[in-house]
Amino acid sequence: MKFVPGQVLEGFSVLSVYTNGNNLVSTGARLLHRTGFTVDVLPFQSVPQAFLWVHSVPFSDKGEPHTLEHLVLGKGSKGSIVSAMEATLLSDSSAFTEQTMTAYHWCVPTGWPSFLCLFRAKLDALLRPNFSEQEAHREVCHMGVTTDEDSGKLQLEEKGTVYNEMVSYYDQPSALMLLALHRKLFGANHAWSLASGGTPDGIRQLTYEEIRKFHSTWYTLNRMGMVLSLGSKVDLGGALRDISEALFELGGGTSSGPLVEAEPLLDWKLPPIAPQSNPESLVMTYFPHTSASEPGEITFAWLAGRTRQMNYLQTYLLSIFLRCLAGGSTSTLHFLTVEDGPQRVHRSGASSISTSDMDNVVGHPCFLFFNSVERDMISEEKIQALRDFVIHTIARVCGKVHSAEAQDDIKLRTQFNTQVLALTRSDRKARRSWRETPPAFGTRGTADFVYRHLSGLNYYMQLEPNDNRYRDILNEQVLDDIEQFAQKALREDSAGEPSSWLPLVEQWGLLSVPYSAAVAPDTELRKAMDAEKTARMDAFTAKLKAKYGLSDDQEALQRYSQEYAEVTAEIEAHNKATELELLKGKGGAPVAASFPDSPPLTYDDELEYEVIAIDPSKQAAVDKIYKPLCTCTPAPAGVEAPRVEELPGPVVVVSRFEGRSTVSVQAAFAVQQDVGAEELVLLSTLSDLLDSSGVILEDGTPLKLKETEEKISEEIEYVSTYLRSSGDGRKVDLVFSVKASTFSEMASHGLAWLRRFSQRPYWRLENLPAMRQAVRSELRDLTDKLKSRDEFWVDGPYNALLRQTCAHYLAARCDLTRMHSCLRMAW
C-alpha cells in the first residue's frame, strides 16, 4: 500500500510518510485514528509484532506508572485471559516503564488473525482493567508471612513484585545519585525529577485510589499509540480496518464522530524546568555496602538546550560530540583519564567512561559518567579537579584554548574529528541495517529505539521550513551534513583555522561549570535500613495483635496467615468466574483463541537455507543429514538434529532473506579440542581481548582499537567475536561475525576483516595497556551485572550448576568463573 500525506483510510489519517532516502517512495507511515490513537506502520518481513506505548507522566515518587505496568495485563480476570491467550497463540511479550512512557510489546508467530485476537484482549485490559484492590495491594507492597528455616517460627516479610524490584534497584550505586541529580537539574517537582518506578518509601504509601486515578488520567486512546510491524503476506488495508474496528469498539466513537486530538511527543510539552542556580555544588549520595573501599561513580551534567530549541542536525551533532568525547573505550577522555598508558594525563580512578543525552526532554540534559571509580578518588577536591580537566579538554577539542605544544592540540582535534567522521559512517550503515532487520518486539530487553526514533523524526522534521511531511526514515540528509561538517573540521585542523565546533559548544553550554554528582559506599547505611525495616515489622505485628485481640506474636501471625490464604482463594474464585463471562463475550470484548492446527516451530519456519560441505566429496553425506531439516514442511518422524561428531567435515550454511542488501558471515570454531585445562583462564577473556585490542594489517602495520574501528567504519558495518554453547554445555564455539552493507563490500573487505580478527590480533607487549583495559572492562561488566536486578543474572548459577562437569562451558558462560579468570588475567 502506498501512503500519501493527508490520505484518509479506514478511520485513519496519514500524518506523515516514511521513505528510504529522499526518493519519496513510501515504506511506512504515521497514522492518526479518529479516537486519537497513533499508529506507526513499518513493513518488515517477519511475524506480526507491535510496540504499544502509553504516556505515563509520574505524579509522585509512589511509582504509579510502574505499578500499572504490572497490573493491567497481569492481574484480574482480563490479565489472566491475556496470559492464557499468549500461551495458546505462542506469543512472546514483554513490558517496561520509562520516565514518561510505559511500553507493552509482543509478537505473534501464528498469523494476523491470532495477532488481532490478542491485540483486542490487550487493548481491552489496558483501557478497562479489572484488577481488584487486594490484587493491587499484593502486587505492589504488602506484608507476607514466611517460616524461618532454623527456628520453625513464623515471621513477617515485606513482599510485592513492584516493591522488591525497586528495593533492589535503589541498592545500586547510581540510583539515588541520579534521582538527586535530576532534582537539581529539573526542579524538585518536575516530572523528570520524580521516580516513575517508585522509591521504596513512596511505594509503601501508594493507595488503590491513587492507582485508579493515574489510570483514568493516562490510559486513554489519545495518550496511547503503537508501532506496528507487518510482513508482505498480511493485507495492510484489511489489517488497518481490523484495528480501526477494535479502537472504535473498545475506545468509543464512530467513523463519523468528532476527531479526538492526540497527544504524542508529550516529553517536549512538559512544563519548563527549574534547575538550581548553583551547579558548582556537589551532589553527594551514598549506597549501602559492606566494604568501605567499594568503587563508586562520578557524573557531570549540562543542560544543552536550556536557552534555545535545537533542530535535528544540532541534536545529532551534540550526540556525536559527546560520544567522541566520552562514549567508551575509543573516546578522547578514555585515553586521557582512564586507560593506563602514555596518553593518560589525568587519573580519574574510573574503569570506564560513558555518556548519554536526553534529546526528548525539555532542556536537553546531557551526562558524562565515570564508572566504577576508586573510592579514594571520590572527594570534593578530586572531583573538582576532574571536572576542570573535562572542561579544559572540551575547550581544547573545539579550539577555545591551546596547550603549550600547538602540535598536540592539532593532533587531538584531528583524532577527535576523524572519529566523528568514522562514527557518522558507522551510524549510516547501522541505520540501513536496522531498516532491514525486524524489531524483535516481544523479546525481553528490546528497547524503545524504534519508538524514540520515529517520535523524534516527526517532531524535529515538522519544525523545518517547507515540511512536506515525507520523513526519510534513515536521516540520510542529516548524516550527509554531519559528514561534511566533520570533513570541514578536519580541513580547519590542518590549516590551523578556528574550529566549527566552537560556536556549537558555546551554544550548548559545555564550557560552563556542569552539575556534579557522586556516589560512594556507606557501611553503616545497611544497618540503618535493616533497623527501619525491623521497626516496620514490629509495628505491623503490634497492629495485628490489636486487631485480633491477641498478646502472642506467633498466634497473631498464624491468624494473619490464615486470613491471607482465605483472601487468596476468594480472588482466584472471583477471577475464574469473571473469566468465564468474558470468554462468552459478556462484560467486555469478546475473546476467542484456539491453539493453531499447524503451529510454527520457529519465527522463520519458511526460511530458505542450504548446507554446503567445504569438501565437495562429502556433500552427499552432508545432504543425508541436513536435507530433511532444510525443507519448509515438518521433519519426518524420527529425524533429530545432527550431532557435531556425526558431521563428515566443516560445512557452510547459506540463508537467504527477501528484500535485504546486507550480508552477514559467521565463522564458528569448536574450542574443546584445542583449549586444554591450563588454558581455560584464557578462554574466559578471549572474545573481549579479540574485540578490544586492535589488529595487525597484512603489511605488518599495527592498528590500535580506535584506529581499527575507524577503518572498519569506512569499509564494512562491524566485526565482533563471542563465545556460544550448546544447550547441554558440551560444545563451545568461538564465533567471528562480520556484517557488510552489500555483497561486494563483504567480498572486498569483510572476509579480510574476519581473517584479521581471527589470525592477526594486536597482541604485543607495546599494546599491553589496551589488553589490560579489556580484561578490566570485562570484570567491571560482570561485577555490575551481578549488582543489577535478579532477572539479568539469576539463570547463570542455575545453568552452571547443571553443567558443572563441562569445564569449557563454565569458562565461557559462567559469570563467577569468568570473574575469577579476569582477576587472574589482570594479575
Image (cartoon, grey):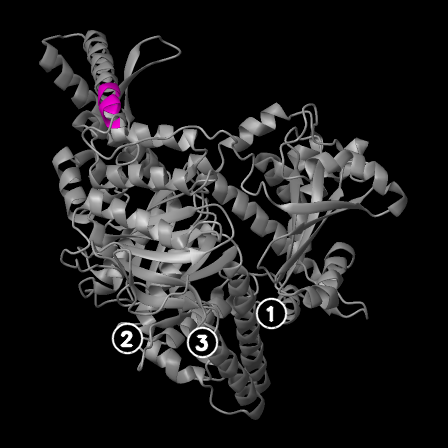
Nearer to us of marks 1 and 2 is 2
**Residue bearing mark 2:** 309
Give residue 186's quadrant in the image: bottom left
Point out residue 474 in the picture as x, y percentages from the top left corner.
47, 68
Q: Nearer the viewer, residue 282 or 551?
A: 551
**Which of the numbered marks, if any, corresponds to residue 343?**
1
Residue hosting label 3 = 478
> In the image shown, does 534 or 747 lie closer to the viewer?
747
Residue 613 placement, left or right of 101: right
* Number of the label disc, if any, that sits on residue 20: none
For image coordinates 40% across by 76% down, the residue present is 313
Disc 2 secondary structure class: loop
* Front disc: 2 or 3: 3
Contact check, label 2 and label 3, Cβ < 8 Å: no
Q: Amino acid at mark 3?
A: Val
Dot 2, crowdedness within 10 Å: few (<14), some or many (≥20)? some
Which residue appears at 26% of the width and 77% of the height? 308
The dominant secondary structure in magenta is helix
Question: Residue 258, relative to residue 345: is it above or below?
Answer: above
The CA span between labels 2 and 3 is 17 Å
- Residue type (three-letter) at the residue carrying disc 1: Gln
Q: Residue drawn at (49%, 59%), measured in percent from left and top?
A: 353
Q: Name the quarter where the N terminus is drawn.
A: bottom left
Magenta extent: 576-582
